[in-house]
Amino acid sequence: MATLVTGAAGFIGSHLTERLAAEGRRVVCLDDFNNYYSPEIKRGNLSAALKRPNVQLYEGDIRDAGLCERVFKRESIGQVVHLAARAGVRLSLKDPLLYEDVNCRGTLVLLELARQHHVRKFVFGSSSSVYGNSRRIPFNEDDPVSEPISPYAATKRAGELYCYNYHHLYGLPIVCLRFFTVYGPRQRPDMAIHKFTRWIDEGRPVEMFGDGSMKRDYTFYSDIVDGVVAALDAKMDFEIVNLGDSRVVELRQLIGLIERALGKSAEIQQLPEQPGDVKITYADISKATRLLGYKPKFPIEKGVELFVEWYRTNCGPCKGK
């Protein structure tokens, strides 16, 4: 039995693939290496894992039902971790049709194949963005999520609903994991911690949207991977589970942590708040602790230090020295 990881060359997907492969599991990777950011970065993310004999890569789009069907048939897929998606709140405002097509239709293609091939577990990578500007703090899985404020968030909520539909109709065991602002080595170049680190390191102004009081629940990648692996192994019928650090950090505080780790000061360029950005994310992780034994190990202070260390080796001006 193999585990299919979609979006396997991405930030979270590549780390998950390495973890599963190191545990001796057979991993089938599916990624289309699109140009949302450099395909070469994604190939680099996956290069170490592909050296293992128990890792197989297929290049293609999750919307390509024929390709996906061939993968399921050829590789005897028993589990699916569906991470592939068009990501990013702000870009979803510019091209909502693409986000709907990839994130909704692509998810349906995989769910239908999972049904046909009697997959034992389907794990769907959802997002804290589904909570919108919820006034209930911290965010609990039972909170209403009927008011997403970006097309990206709406597609992630739609994915959860499709997942429930396939569980209800066909008994497919599914866990939807709501990720809260994941960061760490290999983080996408467009995400805040990566961008801010690069700008401060290069002496460029840091574009700060709003007054710096925006709060996020930042979660180190390895804590997320722990949660995904636990969800794969847990006996569940259908669950939606938050995976976060359960601690909020203001934007100005985050910038300060990056300054300290780099040993450099930031020049702040304050800009208006952006449409689609939520004011706060904050995970109630009691359900994850109860069902998955989930316990975050990396506070933001340590996580930022580890990210900057990776950045200096792999991305900064001193790369290779």
Image (cartoon, grey):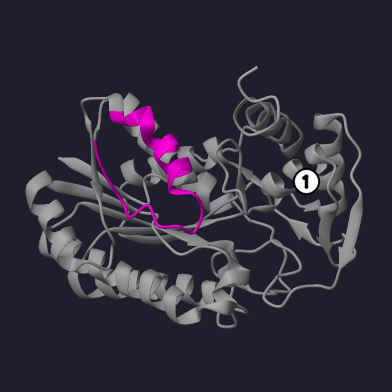
Residue at 80% x, 72% y is 273
Residue 153 shown in magenta:
no
Q: Which amino acid does label 1 sit on?
A: Trp
Return the x and y of residue 18 as percentages of the image width and height.
38, 31
Classify mark 1: residues with Cα within 10 Å, few (<14), some (14-19) or many (20+): some
Q: Is residue 193 depicted above or below 167 in this figure?
A: above
Residue at 25% x, 31% y is 25
* Quarter of the C terminus within the rendering: top right
Return the x and y of residue 294 as percentages of the image width and height.
52, 41
Residue beneath label 1, please? 199
Residue at 18% x, 54% y is 119
Q: In this view, does 124 lie to the left or right of 56?
A: right
Q: Is residue 272 left or right of residue 142?
A: right
Which stretch appears magenta? 27-50
Relative to the observer, which residue lies in front, 147 or 292? 147
Q: Can residue 227 be seen in this view?
A: no
Question: What SS does tag 1 mark?
Answer: helix
